[in-house]
Image: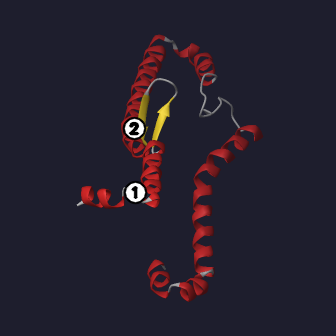
Amino acid sequence: MSCLYRRIHRGNPRFRASEDALGNYARRAHNRIGNCGITFDINDLGLFAGITFPLLLLWLIVSLRREAENMRALFAETSDDELPAVYRLISMTQVFSVPPKITDKPTFAASLWKLPKSLLFVAPAGVQTAMAWLDWSTLPWGRTLNPLVADREV
């Protein structure tokens, strides 16, 4: 069927233009990685992400286990009078967390560091609340445009 269609419309300039456009689309749909000659389709990114994310999680698990083993070995070798000094030295290496200091009362700076950590958990809830309010407040306009879809999304 398609061969007959091509034979009939081969002389038609509109058909040639649509064939050229289809060829250009097919060439643009594949992305190149530098001059390596490697091309991939945009739909392959899901596969790449699906493979990369578990590998990153595995890397995280291995590094956390290694760090826990190192901490156990370090604290097993220290005596009781060296523990505060070792704890202070270890707390200096922490990047994404701030361990509590060995003091009687918390300082203002320590309480200030808790704010960004709590904002990471509260910010998405605020965004979701704002989106729900926006959806609810624009519901009359949605019902005007498409009542079937607007009522199902609420």
Image quadrant assignment for residue 44: top left
Identify which residue, 115 or 87, lies in the foreground.
115
**Disc assigned to residue 11:** 1
Residue pointed to by mark 2:
48
- Residue furthest right in the image: 108
53 above or below 85?
A: below
Residue name at image x 48 percent, y 17 percent: 75
* Secondary structure state at the residue bearing disc 2: helix
41 above or below 16?
A: above
Q: Label 1: how many residues lie within 10 Å, few (<14), some (14-19) or many (20+)?
A: few
Image quadrant assignment for residue 47: top left
Q: Amino acid at mark 2?
A: Phe
Q: Amino acid at mark 1?
A: Gly
Residue 39 percent coordinates (x, y): 42, 33
C-alpha separation, residue under disc 1 versus residue under disc 2: 43 Å
Residue 79 percent coordinates (x, y): 51, 12
Image quadrant assignment for residue 95: top right
